[in-house]
C-alpha cells in the first residue's frame, strides 16, 4: 500500500509542478506530501519553484523596483 | 493620424495613461522577449485603452485594467503566431536541461542549495538580474508557457488551446521550464552568492 505513495525526487518535482497548476489528484498530493516530509532537497526545490511564481507575480503587478528596472533599459520612444 | 491625436489628447486629458506607456512596453517585453513585437503590442494596448476609456470606471488600479487589455492583445498575437500550434514533439526532445540534476533513479545527484528567505530574494538586485538573464535563454515554447501561466495566471487548459498542444505536453513543458529556470538561478545566483 505504501509503495504507491513512494515517489522519486524527479517525480516529486513533477508532482509539485502539477500541483502549482491545479492538476494533481488526491493520490498525487498525498504522495508529494509524504515525500516532502522526508526529503529536504525536494522541499528546497519546491520552495524555489514557489519563489519563481512569486517573482513573476511581482513582475505582473509591476510594483517591484528591481523587476520594473529590468527591462526598462532603452525604453521605446513615445509616438508623437 | 489617430495615434498622434490620441497621444496628445491623453497627455492633456488623461496623463495617468500617458505615463503608463513605458510600463506597458516593459510588461509586453516580459511576455514576448521581442522588442519590436513588444513595442507593437504595447502600442496597440495603449490605443485600445484610450479608445475604451469610457469603460474605465476609475476604481481599482489603472495598471490592473491595462494589464487585462494587454493580456488580450498578447493572446491574440500568440494565437496568430501559433495558428498551427507549437511543434510539441520537436520541442520536447532536445530540452532535457533542468532534469540532468537527477540520476537514473530520479534522485538528486548533488545537494540542493537553499534559496533562503523569499522576501530577501525579491529585494535582491542580483536575483532579478539573474532571473532576467535566465529567462532570456529559455527555449521559446517553455518560456511561452511559463509566462502565460506564472505572469498572466492563465489556466493550463486555455494555454494548451492557445498554443495548440496537448495537456500532457503542457504539463511536461511547464515542469521543464520551472526546473530549467530553477537550475539556472541555482547556478548563477544562489551558488555564485
Image (cartoon, coloured by chain):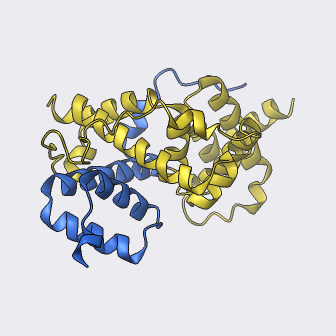
Chain colours: A blue, B yellow
Q: Residue at position x 63%, y 45% from top?
A: B17
Q: In the picture shown, does residue B131 fall above or below A10?
A: above
Residue B93, position as x, y percentages in the image = 50, 34
Give the quadrant of residue B90.
top right
Q: Residue at position x 25%, y 38% from top?
A: B101
Q: Is residue B162 left or right of residue B185?
A: right
Front position in the image: B125 or B19: B125
Q: In the picture shown, does residue B22 fall above or below B71?
A: above
Q: Is residue A24 left or right of residue A48?
A: right
Q: In the picture shown, does residue B115 fall above or below B168?
A: above
Residue B51, position as x, y percentages in the image = 80, 49
Front position in the image: B154 or B73: B154
Q: Is residue B137 left or right of residue B190?
A: right
Residue B184, position as x, y percentages in the image = 30, 33
Give the quadrant of residue A75.
top right
The residue furthest right is B1
Can residue B25 be seen by looking at this rendering? no
Q: Residue at position x 36%, y 38% from top?
A: B181
Total residue callouts: 0
Q: In the picture shown, does residue A44 fall above or below B18?
A: below
Name the image quarter holding the N terminus of chain B. top right
Name the image quarter holding the C terminus of chain B. top left
Can residue B124 be seen by looking at this rendering? yes
Amino acid at each position: 500500500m505504501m509503495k504507491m505513495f513512494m515517489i522519486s525526487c524527479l517525480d516529486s518535482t513533477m508532482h509539485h509542478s502539477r500541483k502549482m497548476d491545479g492538476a494533481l489528484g488526491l493520490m498525487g498530493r498525498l504522495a508529494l506530501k509524504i515525500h516532502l516530509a522526508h526529503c529536504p532537497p525536494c522541499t528546497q526545490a519546491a520552495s524555489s519553484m514557489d519563489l519563481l511564481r512569486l517573482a513573476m507575480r511581482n513582475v505582473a503587478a509591476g510594483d517591484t523596483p528591481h523587476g520594473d528596472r529590468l527591462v526598462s533599459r532603452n525604453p521605446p520612444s513615445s509616438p508623437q | 493620424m489617430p495615434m498622434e491625436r490620441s497621444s496628445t489628447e491623453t497627455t492633456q486629458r488623461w496623463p495617468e495613461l500617458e505615463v503608463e506607456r513605458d510600463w506597458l512596453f516593459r510588461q509586453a517585453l516580459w511576455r514576448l522577449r521581442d522588442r519590436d513585437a513588444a513595442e507593437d503590442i504595447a502600442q496597440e494596448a495603449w490605443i485600445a485603452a484610450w479608445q475604451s476609456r469610457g469603460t474605465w470606471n476609475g476604481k481599482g488600479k489603472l495598471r490592473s485594467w491595462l494589464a487585462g487589455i494587454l493580456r488580450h492583445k498578447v493572446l491574440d498575437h500568440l494565437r496568430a503566431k501559433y495558428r498551427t500550434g507549437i511543434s510539441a514533439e520537436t520541442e520536447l526532445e532536445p530540452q532535457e536541461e533542468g532534469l540532468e540534476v537527477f540520476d537514473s533513479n530520479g534522485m538528486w545527484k548533488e545537494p540542493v542549495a537553499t534559496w533562503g528567505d523569499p522576501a530577501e530574494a525579491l529585494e535582491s538586485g542580483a536575483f532579478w538580474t539573474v532571473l532576467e538573464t535566465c529567462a532570456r535563454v529559455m527555449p521559446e515554447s517553455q518560456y511561452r508557457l511559463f509566462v502565460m501561466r506564472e505572469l498572466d495566471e492563465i489556466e493550463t487548459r486555455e494555454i494548451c488551446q492557445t498554443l495548440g498542444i496537448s495537456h500532457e505536453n503542457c504539463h511536461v513543458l511547464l515542469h521543464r521550464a520551472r526546473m530549467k529556470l530553477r537550475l539556472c538561478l541555482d547556478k548563477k545566483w544562489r551558488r555564485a552568492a
